[in-house]
């Protein structure tokens, strides 16, 4: 009996050593533990407890390789940040060129009233300048230097002249004189034209200044009104400036209105007076009937 037990113990020790060797191998350790039965499982647990810990991978060298990895990562972050900054700068520049610059140019033109880019030719510029000088002579504002006074006086005179023109068109006597040969006394189809004074023409304001009466301001525009049937009337007017008061604004009042039929519809020249009105300021001939 004793020899059998000793033999069994020796056999068990040999199997235990063999199983322990299998546990140390990296492959098939779990399979070997299961194949060995309960003694093998105990041996696997015992070997797991006594087995040395798995070796961790070596740390990176602290020399050139570590500094190179950190510098490469930093370089990549720096390049990405520089790329984002460049895109932002490009976006801001594009907005300034295509959005803000045109908007600033538009408002600058609106405020100043003068175009920044003029595509007219030299001949067209000369024609426009000549036309502007003719209008200045007609409205007698060539001697006005200040821009605000220039615009205000032009506006006041244009409004005063339009009032007289409407007064003539509403006059049945004036329209009948233009339509006397045609027999059509319905709606008037007329066209008004300015009679431009010559270049060396001394306007009424200059004449008054040379006469020593600068406080008296007058304006003497002339118009031709042509009817569709061919008849033409010459309208001569005189305006005087009326200073503004508490209950009325400053204005130009027509103090003299004369209209003559100078040509009939047949083309025959004539000089037939149509009306000749005169009135003092401040109202002049505004409320007089033609």
Image (spheres, rainbow, N blue to C red):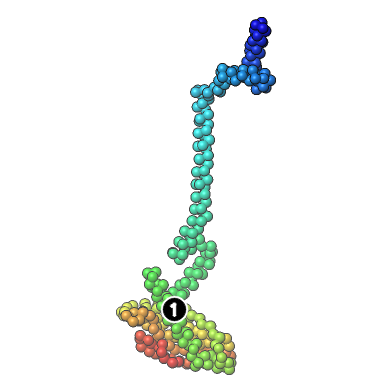
Which residue is located at x 46 percent, y 87 percent? 167
Q: Is residue 147 toward the left or the right of residue 80 in the image?
A: left
Q: Which residue sits at x=52%, y=49%?
A: 91
Regarding residue 210, the answer to whether it shows in the image is: no
The answer to whether residue 169 is visible is yes
Above or below, comparing residue 179 to residue 150 in the picture: below
- In the current view of this chain or complex, which residue is farthest to the right? 35
Q: Position of residue 84 (x, y in %)?
A: 52, 43
View extreme (top): residue: 3
Q: Which residue is tagged 1? A: 158
**Picture quarter with the C terminus:** bottom left
**Residue at the (64%, 10%) spot, across then down:** 9
Nearer to me, 63 or 153: 63
In the image, residue 277 lies at what x, y percent?
41, 91
- State the residue in front, 246 or 28: 28
Residue 25 in the image, given as x and y percentages of width and height: 64, 18
């Amino acid at each position: 009996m004793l020899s059998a037990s000793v033999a069994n113990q020796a056999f068990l020790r040999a199997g235990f050593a063999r199983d322990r060797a299998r546990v140390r191998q990296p492959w098939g350790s779990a399979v070997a533990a299961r194949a060995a039965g309960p003694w093998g499982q105990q041996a696997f647990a015992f070997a797991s407890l006594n087995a040395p810990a798995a070796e961790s991978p070596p740390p990176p060298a602290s020399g050139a390789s570590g500094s190179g990895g950190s510098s490469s990562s930093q370089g990549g972050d720096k390049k990405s940040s520089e790329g984002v900054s460049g895109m932002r700068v490009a976006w801001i520049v594009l907005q300034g060129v295509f959005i803000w610059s045109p908007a600033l140019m538009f408002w600058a033109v609106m405020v100043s009233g003068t175009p920044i880019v003029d595509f007219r030719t030299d001949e067209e510029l000369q024609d426009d300048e000549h036309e502007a000088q003719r209008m200045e002579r007609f409205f007698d504002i060539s001697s006005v230097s200040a821009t605000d006074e220039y615009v205000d006086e032009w506006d006041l005179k244009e409004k005063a002249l339009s009032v007289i023109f409407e007064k003539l068109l509403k006059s049945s006597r004036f329209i009948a004189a233009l339509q006397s040969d045609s027999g059509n006394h319905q709606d008037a189809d007329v066209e008004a034209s300015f009679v431009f004074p010559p270049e060396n023409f001394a306007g009424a304001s200059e004449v008054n200044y040379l006469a020593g009466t600068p406080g008296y301001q007058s304006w003497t525009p002339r118009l031709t009104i042509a009817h569709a049937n061919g008849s033409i009337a010459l309208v001569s007017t005189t305006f005087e400036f009326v200073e503004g008061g508490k209950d009325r604004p400053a204005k130009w009042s027509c103090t003299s209105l004369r209209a003559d039929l100078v040509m009939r519809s047949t083309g025959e020249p004539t000089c037939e007076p149509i009306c000749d009105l005169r009135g003092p300021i401040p109202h002049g001939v505004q409320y007089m009937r033609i």
